[in-house]
Image: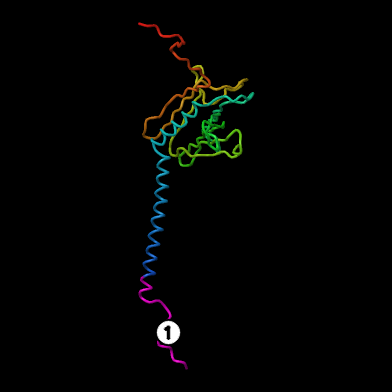
Amino acid sequence: MNPTPPNARRAGFTLVELLLAIALGVGVAGILAALVHGLLSAGDGQSARLQGPVAARAAVRALSREIACAFAPPVKDLAPMQLSTSTEPGKPEVRLAFYAPVPAEPAFAHGYDIAQVAYEVRPAGEGRRELVRIAAPCSGPLTNAPATHLLLTGRFTLAIEAITNNAARTDWPPPKTEKPALPTSMRLSLSWPGEEPIQTEVLLQAATGIRSPVARTNAEPEAK
């Protein structure tokens, strides 16, 4: 039998190596915990931005600004705006679709594209709803790739009405319309539990001409 050499190292870890391994594991666990906490905080922040009265007001402002830019594209028999409501399962409770200019892709100075923009209120279960915006470019490589964005979620109710000749409708265009056109304005009312309803009426600039109340000429002003 050969004797064990005096300088041969025993199998296993020394106490120093074991302590270093434990310290390294604790450090890695701390880093992972910080990453998970950051992801959860970001998710909570995103959820908070999509819920509550502040998010509701932001959603109404965004919808109002885009409705004001709606116009009728030069296509025969094409309805420039469509508004519908439904209680059927699987369908949006409210859907508003119209054509509007959107920033061009790729972006360049003063460039824009035309897109069909749709806002839909969808049931999300347990009395909750989602307000989503869907933009489908009318030309270019993204024509068949609409982009969907979630704007609001929670126990809200959104009512949209088309106003023409002082009459309000929850559907547009009216039945048996030969030449679909834009309504004069749109009325929005978003209700949130425990909060005052957010109500606004948006004038469609392409449907109603706005004249200046001041007559202007090129004549020089008279000296006083």
The quadrant in which residue 191 appears is: top left
Range covered by the magenta-colored residues:
1-19
Of residue 24 and residue 51, the one placed in the foreground of this image is 24
x and y, in percent, of residue 46 in the image = 42, 44
122 lies left or right of 193: right
Q: Is residue 13 above or below residue 101?
A: below
115 lies left or right of 42: right
x and y, in percent, of residue 140 in the image = 61, 36
At 59% across and 40% down in the image, what residue appears?
145
Q: Is residue 10 magenta?
A: yes
User: What secondary structure is the stretch in magenta mostly built from?
Assistant: loop
- Label 1 residue SS: loop
Outermost residue toward the bottom?
1
Q: Is residue 109 above or below residue 218?
A: below
The quadrant in which residue 98 appears is: top right
Q: Is residue 206 magenta?
A: no
For label 1, the crowd category at 10 Å Cα-Cα, with few meaning under 14, some 14 to 19 and many 20 or more, is: few
Q: Is residue 13 above or below residue 157?
A: below
x and y, in percent, of residue 13 in the image = 40, 76
The quadrant in which residue 11 appears is: bottom left
At 48% across and 36% down in the image, what residue appears?
131
* Amino acid type at image mark 1: Ala
The image shows a total of numbered marks equal to 1
Instruction: Look at the image and name its color scheme.
Output: rainbow
Q: Identify the residue position indicated by label 1 in the image.
A: 8
Of residue 223 and residue 33, the one placed in the foreground of this image is 223
x and y, in percent, of residue 48 in the image = 40, 42
Of the 4 image quadrants, the one containing the C terminus is: top left
At 46% across and 27% down in the image, what residue appears?
188
